[in-house]
Amino acid sequence: MRALRSTRVVLDSEIVHADLVIADQCIADVTSYGSIENALDVGDRLIAPGFVDLHSDAVEKEIEPRPSAYFPIDSAVVELDKKLATCGITTMFHAIAFYEESVVGTRGAQMGARIARHIHSLNDHRLLVDNLVHVRYEATSFGSVPVILGLMQDGIVQFLSFMDHSPGQGQYTSVDNWLKDHKSVFGMGEDEAKKVIDIMGEKKALTTEKLHILAQSARQLDISLASHDDDCREKIDFMKKLGATVSEFPTNEEAAVYAREQSLTTGMGAPNVVRGSSQNGNISARRLIKKGLCDFLCSDYHPTSMLQAVYAVSQEIGIPLARSFQFVTSNPAKIAGLNNTGKIKTGYRADLLVIDETYIPTVVLTLKSGVPVYNGLGSFDHIMGSDNSDYNQSQNPLV
Protein backbone atom coordinates (compact mmCIF):
# COMPACT_ATOMS: atom_id res chain seq x y z
CA MET A 1 0.00 0.00 0.00
CA ARG A 2 1.25 3.49 -0.89
CA ALA A 3 0.02 6.98 -0.13
CA LEU A 4 0.28 10.46 -1.62
CA ARG A 5 -0.29 13.74 0.20
CA SER A 6 -0.99 17.23 -1.11
CA THR A 7 -2.58 20.47 -0.02
CA ARG A 8 -4.28 20.51 -3.45
CA VAL A 9 -6.11 17.35 -4.50
CA VAL A 10 -8.65 17.66 -7.31
CA LEU A 11 -11.89 15.97 -6.37
CA ASP A 12 -14.95 16.11 -8.60
CA SER A 13 -15.83 19.76 -8.05
CA GLU A 14 -13.36 21.06 -5.47
CA ILE A 15 -9.69 21.13 -4.53
CA VAL A 16 -8.91 19.92 -1.00
CA HIS A 17 -6.11 19.01 1.41
CA ALA A 18 -5.97 15.21 1.46
CA ASP A 19 -4.00 11.99 1.70
CA LEU A 20 -4.64 9.34 -0.95
CA VAL A 21 -4.12 5.68 -0.18
CA ILE A 22 -3.34 3.36 -3.11
CA ALA A 23 -3.70 -0.41 -2.97
CA ASP A 24 -4.40 -3.16 -5.54
CA GLN A 25 -4.12 -0.69 -8.44
CA CYS A 26 -6.95 1.44 -7.04
CA ILE A 27 -7.59 4.39 -4.77
CA ALA A 28 -8.27 2.63 -1.49
CA ASP A 29 -9.17 5.80 0.37
CA VAL A 30 -9.28 9.58 0.26
CA THR A 31 -8.64 10.61 3.83
CA SER A 32 -7.73 13.60 5.99
CA TYR A 33 -4.53 15.49 5.27
CA GLY A 34 -1.54 14.22 7.28
CA SER A 35 -3.29 11.11 8.56
CA ILE A 36 -1.13 8.53 6.75
CA GLU A 37 2.36 7.90 8.06
CA ASN A 38 5.14 7.93 5.44
CA ALA A 39 2.91 9.28 2.66
CA LEU A 40 4.77 10.88 -0.24
CA ASP A 41 4.20 14.58 0.44
CA VAL A 42 4.20 16.58 -2.79
CA GLY A 43 3.54 19.85 -0.95
CA ASP A 44 1.30 22.26 -2.84
CA ARG A 45 1.74 20.48 -6.16
CA LEU A 46 -1.63 19.53 -7.59
CA ILE A 47 -2.81 15.91 -7.64
CA ALA A 48 -5.36 15.30 -10.42
CA PRO A 49 -6.91 12.32 -12.21
CA GLY A 50 -5.13 11.04 -15.30
CA PHE A 51 -6.44 12.37 -18.59
CA VAL A 52 -8.83 10.43 -20.84
CA ASP A 53 -8.30 11.40 -24.49
CA LEU A 54 -11.12 10.29 -26.80
CA HIS A 55 -9.59 11.49 -30.07
CA SER A 56 -5.96 11.87 -31.11
CA ASP A 57 -4.35 11.08 -34.44
CA ALA A 58 -0.84 11.63 -33.05
CA VAL A 59 0.02 7.97 -33.76
CA GLU A 60 -0.30 8.61 -37.49
CA LYS A 61 2.34 11.35 -37.29
CA GLU A 62 4.55 9.08 -35.20
CA ILE A 63 4.37 6.43 -37.94
CA GLU A 64 4.59 8.85 -40.87
CA PRO A 65 6.19 12.11 -39.69
CA ARG A 66 6.59 13.23 -43.29
CA PRO A 67 4.66 12.10 -46.40
CA SER A 68 5.81 8.59 -47.38
CA ALA A 69 8.45 8.47 -44.62
CA TYR A 70 7.26 5.43 -42.66
CA PHE A 71 8.54 4.07 -39.35
CA PRO A 72 7.76 0.63 -37.84
CA ILE A 73 4.33 0.66 -36.21
CA ASP A 74 5.36 -1.13 -33.01
CA SER A 75 8.23 1.22 -32.23
CA ALA A 76 6.09 4.25 -33.11
CA VAL A 77 3.37 3.15 -30.67
CA VAL A 78 5.87 2.37 -27.90
CA GLU A 79 7.61 5.73 -28.28
CA LEU A 80 4.32 7.64 -28.38
CA ASP A 81 3.18 5.73 -25.29
CA LYS A 82 6.14 7.22 -23.39
CA LYS A 83 5.18 10.71 -24.52
CA LEU A 84 1.57 10.17 -23.42
CA ALA A 85 2.74 9.28 -19.91
CA THR A 86 4.72 12.52 -19.68
CA CYS A 87 1.67 14.48 -20.93
CA GLY A 88 -0.59 12.99 -18.26
CA ILE A 89 -2.73 10.99 -20.68
CA THR A 90 -3.42 7.67 -18.93
CA THR A 91 -6.18 6.48 -21.30
CA MET A 92 -5.70 7.18 -25.00
CA PHE A 93 -8.17 6.47 -27.80
CA HIS A 94 -6.00 6.51 -30.90
CA ALA A 95 -8.16 7.98 -33.68
CA ILE A 96 -7.24 5.94 -36.75
CA ALA A 97 -8.65 7.18 -40.05
CA PHE A 98 -10.08 4.80 -42.65
CA TYR A 99 -10.05 7.18 -45.56
CA GLU A 100 -10.85 7.18 -49.26
CA GLU A 101 -8.61 4.51 -50.76
CA SER A 102 -7.15 6.93 -53.29
CA VAL A 103 -5.54 8.94 -50.48
CA VAL A 104 -2.01 7.79 -49.75
CA GLY A 105 -0.40 7.58 -46.33
CA THR A 106 -1.48 6.12 -43.01
CA ARG A 107 -5.20 6.69 -43.57
CA GLY A 108 -6.15 3.90 -45.99
CA ALA A 109 -8.12 0.81 -44.89
CA GLN A 110 -5.33 -1.75 -44.83
CA MET A 111 -2.83 0.53 -43.13
CA GLY A 112 -5.48 1.61 -40.64
CA ALA A 113 -6.24 -2.00 -39.79
CA ARG A 114 -2.56 -2.79 -39.28
CA ILE A 115 -2.19 0.15 -36.91
CA ALA A 116 -5.32 -0.83 -34.96
CA ARG A 117 -4.21 -4.45 -34.57
CA HIS A 118 -0.71 -3.47 -33.50
CA ILE A 119 -2.07 -1.09 -30.86
CA HIS A 120 -4.46 -3.73 -29.55
CA SER A 121 -1.73 -6.36 -29.38
CA LEU A 122 0.76 -4.03 -27.69
CA ASN A 123 -1.81 -2.87 -25.16
CA ASP A 124 -2.10 -6.46 -23.94
CA HIS A 125 1.62 -6.45 -23.19
CA ARG A 126 3.66 -3.79 -21.44
CA LEU A 127 2.69 -0.31 -22.49
CA LEU A 128 2.75 2.42 -19.88
CA VAL A 129 -0.79 3.75 -20.36
CA ASP A 130 -4.04 2.36 -21.79
CA ASN A 131 -3.87 2.52 -25.59
CA LEU A 132 -7.31 1.97 -27.13
CA VAL A 133 -8.68 2.23 -30.66
CA HIS A 134 -11.06 4.87 -32.04
CA VAL A 135 -11.91 4.08 -35.67
CA ARG A 136 -12.73 7.07 -37.86
CA TYR A 137 -14.68 5.96 -40.93
CA GLU A 138 -14.66 8.30 -43.92
CA ALA A 139 -18.13 8.14 -45.47
CA THR A 140 -16.88 7.45 -49.01
CA SER A 141 -14.30 4.80 -48.10
CA PHE A 142 -16.47 1.84 -49.05
CA GLY A 143 -13.58 -0.63 -49.11
CA SER A 144 -13.02 0.06 -45.42
CA VAL A 145 -16.43 -1.28 -44.33
CA PRO A 146 -15.61 -5.03 -44.23
CA VAL A 147 -12.22 -4.25 -42.68
CA ILE A 148 -13.79 -2.21 -39.87
CA LEU A 149 -16.50 -4.81 -39.30
CA GLY A 150 -13.76 -7.39 -38.81
CA LEU A 151 -11.94 -5.19 -36.33
CA MET A 152 -15.13 -4.62 -34.35
CA GLN A 153 -15.97 -8.32 -34.28
CA ASP A 154 -12.46 -9.06 -33.01
CA GLY A 155 -12.93 -6.68 -30.05
CA ILE A 156 -10.28 -4.24 -31.27
CA VAL A 157 -12.49 -1.13 -31.59
CA GLN A 158 -13.64 0.77 -28.51
CA PHE A 159 -14.99 3.92 -30.21
CA LEU A 160 -16.34 4.66 -33.70
CA SER A 161 -16.93 7.95 -35.49
CA PHE A 162 -18.27 8.84 -38.93
CA MET A 163 -16.53 11.54 -40.96
CA ASP A 164 -17.27 13.32 -44.22
CA HIS A 165 -14.24 15.28 -45.37
CA SER A 166 -15.53 16.02 -48.84
CA PRO A 167 -15.16 19.71 -49.75
CA GLY A 168 -18.02 22.17 -49.47
CA GLN A 169 -19.30 21.19 -46.01
CA GLY A 170 -18.17 20.20 -42.51
CA GLN A 171 -14.55 21.04 -41.84
CA TYR A 172 -13.89 22.14 -45.41
CA THR A 173 -16.36 24.81 -46.41
CA SER A 174 -14.48 25.49 -49.65
CA VAL A 175 -12.64 23.41 -52.23
CA ASP A 176 -9.59 25.66 -51.83
CA ASN A 177 -9.31 24.80 -48.11
CA TRP A 178 -9.61 21.09 -48.91
CA LEU A 179 -6.91 21.27 -51.59
CA LYS A 180 -4.54 23.26 -49.38
CA ASP A 181 -4.87 20.86 -46.44
CA HIS A 182 -4.69 17.62 -48.40
CA LYS A 183 -1.73 18.69 -50.50
CA SER A 184 0.09 19.56 -47.28
CA VAL A 185 -0.91 16.56 -45.13
CA PHE A 186 -0.75 13.85 -47.79
CA GLY A 187 1.85 15.32 -50.10
CA MET A 188 -0.62 15.27 -53.01
CA GLY A 189 -0.11 17.03 -56.27
CA GLU A 190 -2.84 19.25 -57.71
CA ASP A 191 -4.07 16.66 -60.23
CA GLU A 192 -4.11 13.84 -57.68
CA ALA A 193 -6.08 15.93 -55.19
CA LYS A 194 -8.68 16.88 -57.77
CA LYS A 195 -9.04 13.24 -58.78
CA VAL A 196 -9.81 12.32 -55.17
CA ILE A 197 -12.48 15.05 -55.03
CA ASP A 198 -14.13 13.58 -58.12
CA ILE A 199 -14.13 10.06 -56.67
CA MET A 200 -15.60 11.25 -53.38
CA GLY A 201 -18.33 13.13 -55.24
CA GLU A 202 -19.28 10.06 -57.26
CA LYS A 203 -19.67 7.97 -54.10
CA LYS A 204 -21.60 10.49 -51.98
CA ALA A 205 -25.04 9.26 -53.03
CA LEU A 206 -24.21 5.70 -51.95
CA THR A 207 -22.86 6.38 -48.45
CA THR A 208 -26.05 5.92 -46.38
CA GLU A 209 -26.19 2.14 -46.71
CA LYS A 210 -22.58 1.73 -45.54
CA LEU A 211 -23.11 3.96 -42.53
CA HIS A 212 -26.17 1.95 -41.49
CA ILE A 213 -24.18 -1.30 -41.69
CA LEU A 214 -21.42 -0.01 -39.44
CA ALA A 215 -23.82 1.70 -37.03
CA GLN A 216 -25.83 -1.50 -36.59
CA SER A 217 -22.70 -3.46 -35.75
CA ALA A 218 -21.61 -0.77 -33.27
CA ARG A 219 -24.98 -0.95 -31.50
CA GLN A 220 -24.81 -4.74 -31.29
CA LEU A 221 -21.30 -4.63 -29.84
CA ASP A 222 -21.99 -1.67 -27.49
CA ILE A 223 -19.40 0.54 -29.18
CA SER A 224 -19.92 4.29 -28.73
CA LEU A 225 -20.69 6.16 -31.96
CA ALA A 226 -19.85 9.80 -32.70
CA SER A 227 -20.50 12.19 -35.54
CA HIS A 228 -17.72 14.45 -36.75
CA ASP A 229 -17.57 18.08 -37.91
CA ASP A 230 -21.32 18.62 -37.63
CA ASP A 231 -22.36 21.79 -39.44
CA CYS A 232 -26.17 21.59 -39.75
CA ARG A 233 -29.34 20.19 -38.19
CA GLU A 234 -29.87 17.67 -40.98
CA LYS A 235 -26.55 15.97 -40.39
CA ILE A 236 -27.13 15.82 -36.63
CA ASP A 237 -30.63 14.37 -37.12
CA PHE A 238 -29.25 11.73 -39.48
CA MET A 239 -26.42 10.79 -37.14
CA LYS A 240 -28.72 10.59 -34.13
CA LYS A 241 -30.97 8.16 -36.02
CA LEU A 242 -27.90 6.01 -36.64
CA GLY A 243 -27.28 5.92 -32.89
CA ALA A 244 -24.65 8.63 -32.41
CA THR A 245 -24.47 9.99 -28.87
CA VAL A 246 -21.48 12.30 -29.37
CA SER A 247 -20.85 15.26 -31.68
CA GLU A 248 -17.11 15.76 -32.26
CA PHE A 249 -15.93 19.20 -33.34
CA PRO A 250 -19.18 20.94 -34.34
CA THR A 251 -18.04 23.59 -36.78
CA ASN A 252 -20.43 26.38 -35.76
CA GLU A 253 -22.47 27.49 -32.77
CA GLU A 254 -25.81 26.61 -34.34
CA ALA A 255 -24.74 22.99 -34.79
CA ALA A 256 -23.45 22.81 -31.21
CA VAL A 257 -26.72 24.24 -29.86
CA TYR A 258 -28.79 21.77 -31.85
CA ALA A 259 -26.59 18.83 -30.86
CA ARG A 260 -27.16 19.74 -27.22
CA GLU A 261 -30.92 20.03 -27.83
CA GLN A 262 -30.83 16.52 -29.28
CA SER A 263 -29.02 15.24 -26.16
CA LEU A 264 -25.70 14.63 -27.90
CA THR A 265 -22.58 15.36 -25.88
CA THR A 266 -20.17 17.68 -27.66
CA GLY A 267 -16.39 17.71 -27.75
CA MET A 268 -13.75 20.07 -29.08
CA GLY A 269 -10.01 20.05 -29.55
CA ALA A 270 -7.69 21.10 -26.75
CA PRO A 271 -5.34 22.78 -29.29
CA ASN A 272 -8.26 25.01 -30.31
CA VAL A 273 -8.56 26.11 -26.66
CA VAL A 274 -4.83 26.72 -26.21
CA ARG A 275 -4.44 28.62 -29.48
CA GLY A 276 -7.71 30.51 -28.99
CA SER A 277 -9.07 29.58 -32.40
CA SER A 278 -9.60 26.78 -34.92
CA GLN A 279 -6.86 26.20 -37.48
CA ASN A 280 -9.55 25.87 -40.16
CA GLY A 281 -11.49 28.99 -39.27
CA ASN A 282 -14.34 27.11 -37.59
CA ILE A 283 -15.92 27.97 -34.24
CA SER A 284 -13.66 28.75 -31.28
CA ALA A 285 -13.74 26.06 -28.60
CA ARG A 286 -13.46 28.79 -25.97
CA ARG A 287 -16.69 30.34 -27.26
CA LEU A 288 -18.56 27.05 -26.99
CA ILE A 289 -17.20 26.42 -23.49
CA LYS A 290 -18.28 29.89 -22.37
CA LYS A 291 -21.78 29.15 -23.62
CA GLY A 292 -21.91 25.74 -21.96
CA LEU A 293 -21.91 23.93 -25.31
CA CYS A 294 -18.80 21.76 -24.89
CA ASP A 295 -18.61 18.69 -22.65
CA PHE A 296 -15.11 17.36 -23.24
CA LEU A 297 -11.77 18.20 -24.79
CA CYS A 298 -9.46 15.87 -26.72
CA SER A 299 -5.90 16.36 -27.88
CA ASP A 300 -6.87 15.98 -31.57
CA TYR A 301 -3.35 16.20 -33.03
CA HIS A 302 -1.33 17.59 -30.07
CA PRO A 303 -1.20 15.51 -26.85
CA THR A 304 0.70 18.11 -24.82
CA SER A 305 -2.20 20.55 -25.25
CA MET A 306 -4.47 18.67 -22.82
CA LEU A 307 -2.93 20.07 -19.64
CA GLN A 308 -2.48 23.57 -21.03
CA ALA A 309 -6.11 23.61 -22.17
CA VAL A 310 -7.30 22.87 -18.63
CA TYR A 311 -5.51 25.95 -17.32
CA ALA A 312 -6.65 28.07 -20.28
CA VAL A 313 -10.26 27.14 -19.53
CA SER A 314 -9.76 28.21 -15.92
CA GLN A 315 -7.67 31.33 -16.46
CA GLU A 316 -9.12 32.67 -19.71
CA ILE A 317 -12.76 31.64 -19.33
CA GLY A 318 -13.09 31.75 -15.56
CA ILE A 319 -14.28 28.23 -14.87
CA PRO A 320 -12.99 26.96 -11.49
CA LEU A 321 -9.91 24.77 -11.91
CA ALA A 322 -11.53 21.62 -10.46
CA ARG A 323 -14.35 21.89 -12.98
CA SER A 324 -11.90 22.63 -15.79
CA PHE A 325 -10.24 19.27 -15.18
CA GLN A 326 -13.58 17.54 -15.81
CA PHE A 327 -13.27 18.35 -19.54
CA VAL A 328 -10.32 15.94 -19.81
CA THR A 329 -11.05 13.44 -17.00
CA SER A 330 -14.48 12.48 -15.68
CA ASN A 331 -16.52 13.77 -18.64
CA PRO A 332 -14.72 11.84 -21.43
CA ALA A 333 -14.48 8.78 -19.16
CA LYS A 334 -18.26 8.79 -18.73
CA ILE A 335 -18.84 9.30 -22.46
CA ALA A 336 -16.62 6.31 -23.26
CA GLY A 337 -18.37 4.14 -20.68
CA LEU A 338 -15.30 3.92 -18.44
CA ASN A 339 -16.71 3.71 -14.92
CA ASN A 340 -13.44 3.13 -13.08
CA THR A 341 -11.26 6.07 -14.08
CA GLY A 342 -11.39 9.83 -14.49
CA LYS A 343 -11.98 10.69 -10.82
CA ILE A 344 -10.10 10.68 -7.55
CA LYS A 345 -12.57 8.56 -5.67
CA THR A 346 -12.46 5.45 -3.51
CA GLY A 347 -12.61 2.33 -5.67
CA TYR A 348 -11.50 4.07 -8.84
CA ARG A 349 -8.31 3.04 -10.60
CA ALA A 350 -5.28 4.95 -9.33
CA ASP A 351 -4.59 6.83 -12.57
CA LEU A 352 -3.10 9.96 -11.04
CA LEU A 353 -1.00 12.98 -11.95
CA VAL A 354 1.17 15.30 -9.90
CA ILE A 355 1.37 18.73 -11.52
CA ASP A 356 3.91 21.44 -10.77
CA GLU A 357 2.70 24.97 -11.50
CA THR A 358 5.93 26.84 -10.66
CA TYR A 359 6.63 28.07 -14.18
CA ILE A 360 3.99 26.64 -16.49
CA PRO A 361 1.78 23.72 -15.44
CA THR A 362 3.85 20.57 -15.97
CA VAL A 363 3.21 16.91 -15.18
CA VAL A 364 6.03 15.72 -12.92
CA LEU A 365 4.62 12.33 -11.89
CA THR A 366 2.17 9.97 -13.60
CA LEU A 367 0.74 6.89 -11.93
CA LYS A 368 -1.10 4.27 -13.97
CA SER A 369 -3.08 1.87 -11.81
CA GLY A 370 -0.94 3.04 -8.90
CA VAL A 371 2.39 2.35 -10.64
CA PRO A 372 4.73 5.25 -11.55
CA VAL A 373 5.05 5.33 -15.35
CA TYR A 374 6.67 8.75 -15.51
CA ASN A 375 8.72 10.24 -12.68
CA GLY A 376 10.14 13.73 -12.72
CA LEU A 377 10.11 14.14 -8.94
CA GLY A 378 13.06 12.16 -7.68
CA SER A 379 14.24 8.65 -6.88
CA PHE A 380 11.94 5.70 -7.35
CA ASP A 381 12.67 4.52 -3.82
CA HIS A 382 11.07 7.69 -2.52
CA ILE A 383 8.11 7.44 -4.89
CA MET A 384 7.35 3.83 -3.97
CA GLY A 385 7.21 4.71 -0.27
CA SER A 386 6.30 2.34 2.53
CA ASP A 387 3.48 -0.15 2.72
CA ASN A 388 1.54 1.96 5.27
CA SER A 389 0.45 -1.28 6.94
CA ASP A 390 -0.95 0.54 9.94
CA TYR A 391 -3.51 2.41 7.85
CA ASN A 392 -7.06 2.30 9.18
CA GLN A 393 -9.56 2.67 6.31
CA SER A 394 -12.34 3.72 8.67
CA GLN A 395 -10.65 7.13 9.01
CA ASN A 396 -12.27 8.77 6.03
CA PRO A 397 -13.91 12.17 6.40
CA LEU A 398 -13.80 13.08 2.71
CA VAL A 399 -15.71 10.30 0.99
Image (cartoon, rainbow, N blue to C red):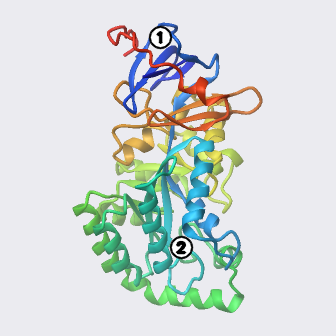
Q: Say whether residue 310 is left or right of residue 124.
A: right
Residue under label 1: 36
The answer to which of 56 and 367 lies nearer the viewer is 367
Instruction: Look at 38% across and 46% down and name the residue there.
Output: 335
Q: Quadrant of the C terminus?
A: top left
Q: Position of residue 133 (x, y in %)?
A: 43, 60
Q: Position of residue 148 (x, y in %)?
A: 37, 73
Tell us which disc is closer to us: 2 or 1.
1
Type of amino acid at the residue the image marks with label 1 = Ile
Q: Is residue 177 above or below residue 91?
A: below
Q: Say whether residue 394 is left or right of residue 182.
A: left
User: Could you give the CA–CA distance between mark 2 and mark 1, rounded to whole angstroms?
Assistant: 54 Å
Q: Position of residue 170 (x, y in %)?
A: 53, 67
Instruction: Look at 34% across and 13% down and name the residue there.
Output: 393
Q: Is residue 271 above or below residue 163?
A: above
Q: Residues within 10 Å of mark 1 (few under 14, many from 20)?
A: many
Q: Position of residue 203 (x, y in %)?
A: 44, 87
Type of amino acid at the residue the image marks with label 2 = His
Q: Secondary structure at mark 1?
A: loop
Residue under label 2: 165
Q: Quadrant of the N terminus?
A: top left
The answer to which of 204 and 109 lies nearer the viewer is 109
Q: Secondary structure at mark 2?
A: loop
Q: Report if residue 140 is visible in the image.
A: yes
Q: Is residue 125 above or below residue 97?
A: above
Kindly indicate the quadrant of the structure image that contains residue 106: bottom right
Instruction: Look at 66% across and 63% down and name the residue there.
Output: 280
The answer to which of 104 and 42 lies nearer the viewer is 42
- Mark on residue 228? none
Is there a contact, CB below 8 Å, between mark 2 and mark 1? no
> Which comes before the other along the chain, label 2 or label 1?
1
Q: Report if residue 233 is visible in the image.
A: no
